[in-house]
Amino acid sequence: MQLLPALVAGKPLLSDRSVEVTNPSTGQVMAVTVDCGPAEVALAVESAAEAQPSWRRTAVAERARVLRRLSQLIERDMEELGRLESEQTGKPLAQGRRDAELTARYYDFYASAVETFYGTTIPLNDSSFVFTSYEPHGVTGHIVPWNYPMQILSRSVAPSLAMGNCVVVKPAEEAPLTALRLGQLALEAGLPAGAFNVVPGMGETAGAALTAHKGIGHISFTGSVEVGRIIAHAAAERLIPVTLELGGKSPNVVFADADLDRAVPIIVNSILQNAGQTCSAGSRLLVQREIHDELVARVADAFRAATVGPALSDPTVGPLITDEQRERVLSFAALARQEATLVCGGEALRGGDYGDGFFVQPTLVDDVAPDSRLAQDEIFGPFLAVTTFGTEQEAVTMANGTDFGLVAGVWTSDVGRAHRMVREIVSGQVFVNSYGASGGVELPFGGFKNSGYGREKGAEGLRGFAQVKTGVIGL
């Protein structure tokens, strides 16, 4: 099997170390990439630093043109990218295609956003002209997870490039293939060699080297709380900014006056999409006592009707990313049998049509205590924990009762209650009678508490990759 190289300064770069990429639907190796270490990462950072002054001086309109061209190339190759994303992550094919569509949207959105991203003038006094401008950090590092490789890469790379930075991307070792392809398309779009570098490899080699390199001016990381703390510490040692998008244990809070016909399909999708391997997955269902039985029955019916299968067959639920992750989900199902009520699911699917893939049934668990591990730990699988509440204040307390604060959903027909819940829930995004906003490139995204800090997406994404400079001219 051919060894896939890193992409540094617009050219392939090999290493004497390698990493196997496994197809989660089959359990078989589908590709082998280099495992970059300090030497390869240093070359990537140096190439980005060499390209950055020229890219920074490039007119904003020209930067925008290049980003739009990249968006068009992604649209041209959307089927290829969608299938590759589906194969390497295990997500259903329709979701891989949707990810490719949203990836193109990021570059198009930030091409337009940066053209209207202005500094300000400050009326200090009659003897001074005072203004602000936005300056790039220089070289930015991007450590990308395996669950949404194209989207999460692009939601930070697109604004960084738009602001005049150059980038070094470390994709997850489990799913680096679309990152390498995007790097090639960036060159075809007209980005300078060195502006978009991709260094695949293990976290403890490529990731650690990128985090530690003194030439990096900003780090963007999406992943676990534990690794996020390590990266934040390393960034603090060098006094550079970092954007952290970490875990979640997001609730859907359903009141008795909710429209269940509208709510149920969205609640189910919020946890079954990408087999629940989503930081913003709606993994807790908080339901008011009066409608508990009806809502749980409806969700259980939807879980049982969901199809599970290989990614390219486009099921409702694909495999988990690794066997280790499947075993983690199964361990929580075992805990549920002891501490709660297992309504459906909780079993691995092996053999036959499932072969050696990493499949597990969608799992619904009722009677979950709000302080239990089932309600507190991020499981990262198609696993929904149900807890009952009585009053609005109890719902608020339960919604805020974890160490996370990434996304929440509220379902009610009471407008006043909707506003109160948005105000009281401690979360980066709160949706009412909806969840996730179908991509939401325009919507600032990020967490409170252990879900991280900093914001990506929307205009906030541009601000995160810029520094404000104040100029004062005496008159």
Image (cartoon, rainbow, N blue to C red):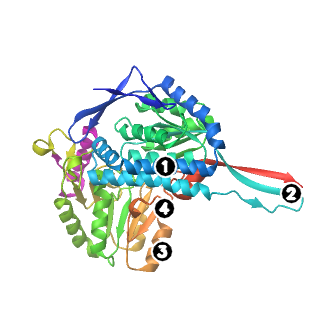
Residue type of the residue flagged with mark 3: His
Residue 35 falls in image quadrant:
top left
Q: What secondary structure is found at the residue carrying circle 2? A: strand
Proximity of marks 1 and 4: CB atoms separated by less than 8 Å: no
Q: Position of residue 377 (x, y in %)?
A: 35, 50
- Mark 3 vs mark 2: give the one in front: 2
Proximity of marks 4 and 2: CB atoms separated by less than 8 Å: no
Segment colored magenta: 321-348
Left or right for 29, reference 178: left
Left or right for 314, reference 416: left
Q: Is residue 169 above or below residue 96?
A: above
Determine which of the numbered discs, if any, sits on residue 128 in the image: 2
Q: Position of residue 430 (x, y in %)?
A: 45, 65
Placement of the C terminus among the 4 image quadrants: bottom right
Residue 449 visible to an observer of this rendering: no
Residue on which disc 4 sits? 426
Q: Which of disc 2 and disc 3 is earlier in sequence?
A: 2
